Image (cartoon, grey):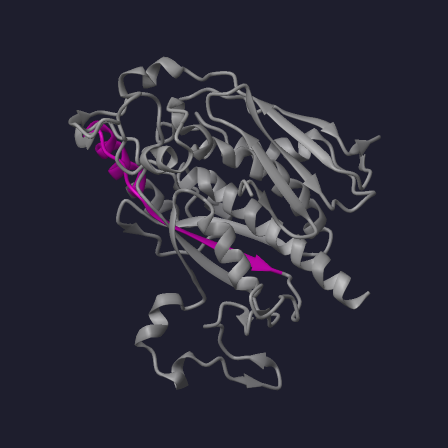
Amino acid sequence: MSGSSFGTIFKITTFGESHGKGVGVIIDGVTPGVEIDETVIQHQLDRRKPGQSSITTQRKESDKIHILSGVYEGKTTGTAMSLILYNEDQISSDYNSIKDLFRPGHADFTYLQKYGIRDHRGSGRASGRETSARVAAGAVAMKILNSKGINITAYTIRAAGINCIERDLTVIEKNNLRACDSSAAEKMEQKIISLINEGDSVGGIVECLITGVKPGLGEPVFDKIDAELAKAMVSLGAVKAVEFGSGFACADMKGSEHNDSMDKNGFKSNNAGGIIGGITNGEDIIFRIAVKPTSSISKEQKTVNIHGHEHPIKTEGRHDPCICPRIVPVVEAMTSLVLIDMYKRQAALLS
């Protein structure tokens, strides 16, 4: 088992490395007859690609998508879709000076322990570049979900220690943080720029809102829909925590406060985040993820080399000082993949 596949019926397998020839994905279980072309997928990839602003990595990748199979005359055929993006702007020499060093916060040490070999160039398979393949697959899933009236919107609600006060979804794509509060986004950006000058990075919190999902979706007991979403989120290298609805705040609530009571019009609150017993209840699904500070920083740190000798290290190259804005479309993609798979599993159950 390589761990590169995700899903049960709508299943994806990603491949490729940050500094290899390219990255890609094979999608199985696609509904036939769905109208789709490169532009639908490209739109989502353009939201994730590097070089979008001063607070993202300046690596220049067009992230041009190529559909190799599974589409004929603009419609999915139902057979496996194969999508690939070729790398264009990798500068592997940036990593020569740290070839034998374990970078703090990176998977260098663990990959070497597991495989006995590692690709030191841009983290290889552990690179965030792998997520571009997920976004490509998620765009296909999202097209199908949108036809069912389901909408998925992720956005930054906290970064660099600054919280969003407003929740205005119309401003998300109008600021560099993809935050739901324009005023907070400006403060976040200023703080991030100051930390760039110090050679450091920051983390944040991204929230995801899902509307239009009817009650009854989910596969208890081990494949609860929140369990599947949690796995999808934590499978992203930058994510260190996930919470649904009131989340960790429920630890300080009373049962009478946390329980979502009902009347003839439905639920009176949504502390459960739209999921009860691992099954959707028809309310909006809401969850949040904690995004760690980018591990690659130019500030000097301490580490050891492959021989166990202590050594100072500075990570050169082009890296995101804050991952939040570029992880937003990845969160939406992974959410789409979970939901479409759950819908297909539900259909199989009832057939």
Question: On the picture, is 32 further left or further right than 134?
Answer: right
Residue stretch rendered in magenta on the structure: 188-211
**Image quadrant in which the C terminus is located:** bottom right
Give the camera-side residue of 269 and 334. 334
- Quarter of the image where the N terminus is located: top right
Q: Report the residue that reaches farthest toward the top.
A: 93
- Residue closest to the eye, 70 or 55: 70
> On the image, which quarter does residue 104 sit in?
top left
Q: Is residue 241 visible?
A: yes
**Where does residue 346 sit, x and y in percent of width and height?**
72, 63
Q: Residue at x 35, y 83 (%)?
A: 254
Q: Is residue 4 magenta?
A: no
Measured along the vertical axis of the image, is residue 327 above or below residue 229?
Answer: above
Left or right of residue 329, residue 96 in this image: left
Does residue 44 show up? no
Identify the residue at image location x=42%, y=40%: 325
Residue 124: percent from the left, percent from the top? Answer: 44, 28
* Residue closest to the eye, 96 or 216: 96
Q: Indicate left or right for 280 with 89 as reference.
A: right
Q: Is residue 209 magenta?
A: yes
Is residue 40 rendered to the left or right of residue 221? right
Residue 37's place in the image compared with 270, above or below, is: above
Query: Between residues 78 and 328, which one lies in front from this camera angle?
Result: 78
Relative image position of residue 261 (x, y in whole percent): 50, 84
Which residue is located at x 54 percent, y 21 percent? 62
Q: Is residue 225 above or below residue 169?
A: below
